[in-house]
Image (tube, rainbow, N blue to C red):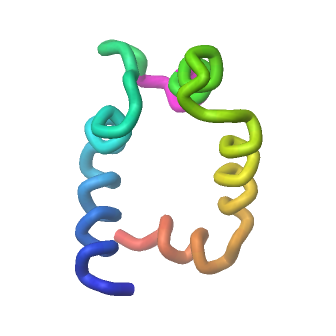
Amino acid sequence: MNNNMMQMYQQFRQNPLGMLSQKYSIPQGLNDPFDIIQHLLNTSQVSQGQVNKYMNMRNNPMIQQLMNMK
C-alpha cells in the first residue's frame, strides 16, 4: 500500500466523520453509522447499489486485514 493511501486510512480512523464530511453533507450531531448511511440514502448522496457494494467489501480478506491494522 502506498504512503498516501496509508495516510488517508489513518486520517479516516482518527476522524471518520470529518473525512466523510469532505465529500458528503452530513448534519452535525449525526454520529451513528447506520443513521449516516440512511441520511445519505434519503438525500440521494449515495445509491443503494453503492451502499451494497461497500458493505460487501467488508467480506474481502484484504479489507478485513487492513481494517484490523492499528
Q: Where does the C terminus fall, quadrant-wise?
A: bottom left
Count of all numbered marks drawn on residues in the image: 0
Look at the image and say whether residue 34 sits in the magenta stretch: yes
Q: Nearer the viewer, residue 11 or 70?
A: 11
Q: Is residue 47 left or right of residue 30?
A: right
Look at the image and say whether residue 41 sits in the magenta stretch: no
Report x, y in % for residue 24.
40, 31
Q: Nearer the viewer, residue 40 or 63?
A: 40
Report x, y in % for residue 62.
60, 79
**Helix, strand or loop for the magenta stretch, by majority:** helix
The residue drawn where x is 30% and y is 44% is 19
Report x, y in % for residue 37.
58, 29
Question: Which residue range is magenta in the image?
Answer: 31-35
The residue drawn where x is 69% and y is 50% is 55
Q: Where does the N terminus fall, quadrant-wise?
A: bottom left
Q: Is residue 70 left or right of residue 14?
A: right
Q: Given the current orientation, which residue lies at the most extreme front position? A: 44
Quarter of the view holding residue 44: top right
Quarter of the view holding residue 30: top left
The residue drawn where x is 55% and y is 76% is 65
